[in-house]
Image (cartoon, coloured by chain):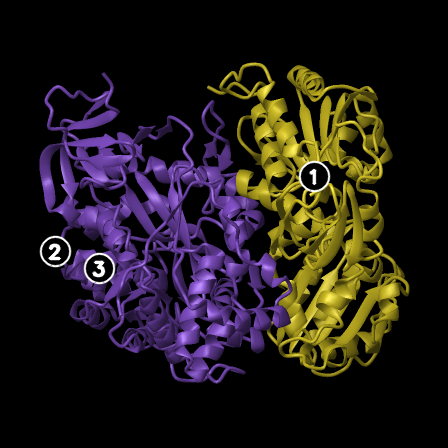
């Protein structure tokens, strides 16, 4: 397959949570030439494949054999009393399985990059549930599309084309003209430029605006006047005036099938889980009037797979501590950033080191002081100077696998380019097998009577 | 010299398929199968399990549960609160750690089923778009042979074919879809009702003869057409029907009409308990209509049922019946999850607690037991709790005791709501199940209903899935902790401890169909789905060890 150019179609892209699966690519040796379906985010990612060939393994920056690196990594983990495995969203089910298995063996904490992205959205679901749908349902039915704190025109470039704005749907024969599109954000965005209506929300007033909408849904008549700011806190300054929100509430009630896509602009603010909980409650309320759904716009290609696999194996989607020999769950307690800030880990396996960019300065500082083992794709520059660095095969390019789209629809990934790089599943499995003899119980287990 | 035999010696064998009812005999096993005893007296087994004084049965088969796939995993994801309080599942040298609660993690699911003596289980509701996900969870669900049913009762292509009377095309579509999903059976969930739920506020169908929005097809036509397709393809398991109006007072007439809609074709009505209610929407008039429905089942041998027994306590309701999930979360004021799957299906999840002080819950509990005790032929009623909907599968030993011990049943009846105590058939029923009848409703019967000719029995050629119990007066104790469980010929469980890693097989069908229809399906598919046609079928790489269950001739 590598000796001459080969064309592939219906290839899935894992750069963002859209996981578009209609790409056409030409493969020339180790290089990939995008032919169609490749957006501006994905094009540079594909073009870097085969551009550089970092060593499959390195210790302290110096190339070494895989065996040496695995031995060194296992030694680090054997000495660790409180290891952390983190990342998993640039991987696939097999890599995620191997990571949980290693964590189980070590009695480690395991957490996904979601803990610094949409974890608050998952916590909100744990509080109130969620009314949601697959993206094709949006394409076929949603005549009202709202983006809240999200800018998919930039973050998910083909979202409009494939799912939300433009496609002709089963019950939306007019395509874009059958849809009303509303953006709620703190300032106009590229997405609002494509929308029918832009609603300004004052910074950190999302919760109050959502709560106002929940109230307005219950009213039969438009409010006579704005909320009174009796305590002079400014909390009633929501951004848009109440009559605009009244119109939005009416529009929400009147549509046939509504959807609100929400992003980190809602989830990653302080008390983001409360913002999302409010939004999901609003959407649940709306189902007393019409059909309405919500969808978080997830960022990395298989972050949904990360929390799905960790969840089916342990019962919890992220922030899992296996130190007692069984899974325990604690957002804020067993999440990577907080563990690192509190110096509660003494070694870290980064399955995809790009999430490190989202750590707080204090967490990043501690990460630099402890031994680290990083596994990265060859077309992505590592973000840390790891003690042991592995370069692993890209799922969907070098290796087969599965990516879970943002709506949990599983998309098959196929190999299109030959490689000598091992998969992260193979590296993590080798590390586990290289550990000293399993004591039949987790090394850090608290002895219980 | 080793001949590779395992001998289960001297146990009291219950093997209803072969007419063996409590006979002391040896069971010989080789290469994962039950075999005839060797004729050469010099042939010795490699290993003998002394089963003298013990009860030997085929491994249990759960023919309707929810153990893998998107809705199961979402239920895990959204209910951490119940796992923290549940018993822990620790890692050992041979097993993974896990969590319990009403929706255990994958590894824990396999270990706990095997610990109960169950060796086969079927997930009952998978949208084919999520089939790949379900296979991935199966690959992490050890100890069990397993398969799943594919949701079809609200599939747009199905409804279009049924509306147009294009039966041949529908047959081909069902064959293609099962092969693409690598599923086991055709499942209907609230046929037509989930599509209504997607198209309007609180939408649902309420009877079998009102056309579905946009599709001009009635639930009755959907049921009849799919039952026909299943027989035309010769699928081993009949059409598996979750009828309309689940859980609603007065729904028994809908259930009776659903049985009639099959027009004599094979059909399995699932969690029939939830479909046997008398009364008006006014909950005060809630009651049981098991008697006329059971009589209809008794008189029509094309029909089988599983019960969907309710047990008191907290659990999670999860269903492909979107409007039902909304209804339940409103009734109980709980958190609510709903997910609509394009072209195919819906999903509802809500926590639920069955309380013996509640009239409705007490009726649900009693109605399940009425079903077990009033269907004359145990071969046509299978044990289920619709795990976790009526309660977790871990409740099976308690249900067995309720069926085998009428004093215990009467004692529990005294603890439920007065209206049920006084009005349920239970107070007058003396019937007690025998061990042989228990073996029928928990293994031999489900195997026959599923068309699994190698399971549920201990005759030569059967899969060597065997459970060995220590007899006990208290049947709950007896069935809670089997002494040994043998899976595929290997000793897998001793007293609840998993002895080695065993993943089990995926059971699926690969029916032959008219492939000429594929281009029509492809054109429809590419227009409305959000993934490519070519990326839809589940490849062989998603099957670990697997077995294709052959089709048969029914038409």
The chain containing the residue under callout 3 comes to B
Residue A396 locus on image (x, y percent): 68, 46
The answer to which of B463 and B345 lies nearer the viewer is B463
Secondary structure category for the residue under label 3: helix
Q: Residues within 10 Å of mark 2 (few under 14, many from 20)?
A: few
Query: Outermost residue, front direction?
Result: A4
Quadrant occupied by the N terminus of chain B: top left
Residue tagged by mark 1?
A418
Query: Which tag is nearer the camera, tag 3 or tag 2?
Result: 3
Viewer-proximal residue, A266 or A114? Answer: A114
Q: Could you say which disc has been placed on residue B430 in the image?
A: 2
Residue labelled with disc 3: B380
Protein chain holding label 2? B
Q: Which chain is purple?
A: B
- The answer to whether mark 2 and mark 1 are in CB contact below 8 A is no
Determine the secondary structure under disc 1. Answer: loop
Who's the residue at 60% across and 46% down the image?
A: A308
Horizontal and vertical percent position of residue A333: 68, 35
| Disc 2 from disc 1: Cα separation | 70 Å
Q: Is residue A337 above or below residue B369?
A: above
User: What chain is tagged by disc 1?
Assistant: A
CA distance separating discs 3 and 2: 20 Å
Marks 3, 2 in one chain: yes
Say which of B544 and A131 sits in front. B544
- Return the x and y of residue A261 as percentages of the image width and height: 73, 63
């Amino acid at each position: 397959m590598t000796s001459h150019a080969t064309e592939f179609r219906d290839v899935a892209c894992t750069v963002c949570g859209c996981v578009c699966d209609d790409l056409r690519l030409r493969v020339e040796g180790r290089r990939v030439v995008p032919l169609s379906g490749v957006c501006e985010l994905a094009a540079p990612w594909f073009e870097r494949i085969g551009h550089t060939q970092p060593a499959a393994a390195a210790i302290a920056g110096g190339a070494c054999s895989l065996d040496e690196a695995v031995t060194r990594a296992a030694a680090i983990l054997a000495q660790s009393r409180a290891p952390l495995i983190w990342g998993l969203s640039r991987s696939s089910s097999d890599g995620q399985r191997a990571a949980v298995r290693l964590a189980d063996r070590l009695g480690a904490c395991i957490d996904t990059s979601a803990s610094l992205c949409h974890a608050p959205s998952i916590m909100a679901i744990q509080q109130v549930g969620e009314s949601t749908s697959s993206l094709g349902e949006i394409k076929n039915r949603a005549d009202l599309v709202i983006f809240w704190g999200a800018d998919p025109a930039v973050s998910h470039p083909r979202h409009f084309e494939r799912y939300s704005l433009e496609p002709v749907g089963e019950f939306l024969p007019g395509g874009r003209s059958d849809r009303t599109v509303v953006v709620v954000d703190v300032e106009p965005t590229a997405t609002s430029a494509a929308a029918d209506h832009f609603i300004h929300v004052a910074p950190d007033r999302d919760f109050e605006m959502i709560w106002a909408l929940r109230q307005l849904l219950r009213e039969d008549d438009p409010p006579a006047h704005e909320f009174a700011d009796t305590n002079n806190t400014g909390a009633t300054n929501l951004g848009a005036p109440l009559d605009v929100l009244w119109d939005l509430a009416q529009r929400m009630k009147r549509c046939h099938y509504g959807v609100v896509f929400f992003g980190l602009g809602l989830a990653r603010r302080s008390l983001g889980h409360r913002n999302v909980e409010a939004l999901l409650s609003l959407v649940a309320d709306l189902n007393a009037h019409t059909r309405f759904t919500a969808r978080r716009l997830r960022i990395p290609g298989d972050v949904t797979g990360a929390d799905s696999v960790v969840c089916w194996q342990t019962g919890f989607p992220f922030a899992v501590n296996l130190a007692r020999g069984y899974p325990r769950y604690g957002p804020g307690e067993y999440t990577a950033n907080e563990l690192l800030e509190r110096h509660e880990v003494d070694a870290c396996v980064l399955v995809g080191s790009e999430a490190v960019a989202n750590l707080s300065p204090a967490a990043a500082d501690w990460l630099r002081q402890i031994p680290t083992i990083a596994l990265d794709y060859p077309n992505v520059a590592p973000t840390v100077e790891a003690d042991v660095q592995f370069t692993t095969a890209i799922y969907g390019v070098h290796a087969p696998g599965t990516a879970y789209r943002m709506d949990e629809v599983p998309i098959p990934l196929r190999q299109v380019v030959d490689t000598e790089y091992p998969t992260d599943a193979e590296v993590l499995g080798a590390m586990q097998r290289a550990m000293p003899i399993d004591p039949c119980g987790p090394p850090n287990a608290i002895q219980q009577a | 010299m080793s001949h590779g035999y395992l001998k289960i010696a001297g146990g009291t064998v219950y093997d209803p398929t072969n007419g063996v009812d409590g006979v002391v005999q040896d069971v010989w096993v080789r290469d994962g199968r039950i075999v005839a005893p060797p004729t050469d007296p010099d042939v010795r087994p490699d290993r003998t399990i002394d089963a003298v004084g013990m009860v030997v049965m085929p491994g249990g088969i759960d023919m309707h549960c929810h153990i893998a796939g998107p809705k199961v995993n979402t239920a895990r994801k959204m209910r951490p609160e119940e796992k923290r309080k549940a018993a822990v599942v620790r890692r050992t040298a041979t097993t993974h750690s896990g969590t319990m609660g009403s929706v255990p993690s994958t590894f824990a699911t396999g270990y706990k089923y095997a610990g109960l003596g169950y060796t086969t289980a079927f997930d009952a509701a998978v949208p084919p778009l999520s089939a790949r996900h379900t296979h991935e969870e199966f690959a992490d669900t050890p100890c069990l042979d397993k398969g799943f049913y594919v949701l079809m009762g609200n599939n747009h292509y199905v409804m279009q074919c049924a509306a147009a009377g294009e039966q041949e095309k529908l047959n081909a579509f069902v064959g293609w879809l099962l092969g693409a999903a690598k599923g086991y059976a055709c499942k209907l969930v609230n046929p037509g009702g989930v599509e209504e739920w997607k198209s309007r506020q609180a939408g649902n169908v309420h009877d079998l003869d009102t056309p579905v929005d946009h599709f001009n097809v009635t639930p009755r036509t959907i049921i009849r057409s799919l039952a026909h397709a299943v027989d035309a393809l010769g699928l081993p398991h009949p059409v598996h029907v979750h009828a309309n109006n689940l859980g609603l007072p007065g729904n028994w007439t809908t259930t009776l009409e659903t049985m009639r809609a099959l027009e004599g074709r094979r059909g399995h009505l699932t969690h029939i308990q939830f479909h046997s209610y008398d009364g008006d929407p006014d909950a005060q008039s809630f009651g049981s209509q098991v008697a006329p429905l059971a009589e209809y089942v008794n008189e029509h041998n094309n029909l089988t049922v599983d019960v969907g027994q309710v047990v008191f306590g907290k659990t999670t309701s999860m269903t492909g019946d979107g409007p039902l999930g909304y209804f339940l979360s409103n009734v109980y004021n709980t958190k609510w999850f709903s997910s609509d799957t394009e072209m195919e299906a819906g999903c509802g999840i809500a926590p639920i607690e069955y309380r013996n002080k509640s009239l409705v819950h007490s009726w649900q509990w009693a109605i399940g037991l009425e079903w077990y005790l009033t269907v004359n032929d145990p071969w046509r009623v299978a044990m289920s709790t619709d795990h976790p909907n009526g309660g977790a599968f871990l409740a099976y030993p308690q249900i067995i005791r309720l069926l085998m011990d009428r004093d215990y049943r009467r004692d529990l009846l005294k603890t439920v709501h007065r209206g049920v105590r006084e009005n349920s058939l239970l107070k007058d029923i003396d019937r007690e199940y025998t061990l042989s009848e228990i073996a029928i409703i928990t293994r031999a019967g489900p195997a026959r209903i599923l068309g699994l000719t190698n399971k549920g029995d201990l005759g030569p050629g059967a899969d060597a899935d065997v459970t060995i119990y220590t007899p006990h007066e208290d049947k709950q104790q007896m069935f809670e902790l089997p002494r040994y469980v043998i899976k595929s010929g290997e000793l897998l469980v001793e007293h609840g401890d998993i002895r080695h890693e065993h993943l089990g097989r995926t059971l699926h069908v690969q029916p032959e169909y008219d492939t000429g229809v594929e281009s029509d399906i492809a054109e429809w598919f590419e227009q409305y789905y959000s993934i490519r046609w070519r990326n839809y079928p589940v490849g062989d790489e998603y099957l670990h060890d697997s077995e294709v269950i052959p089709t048969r001739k029914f038409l």
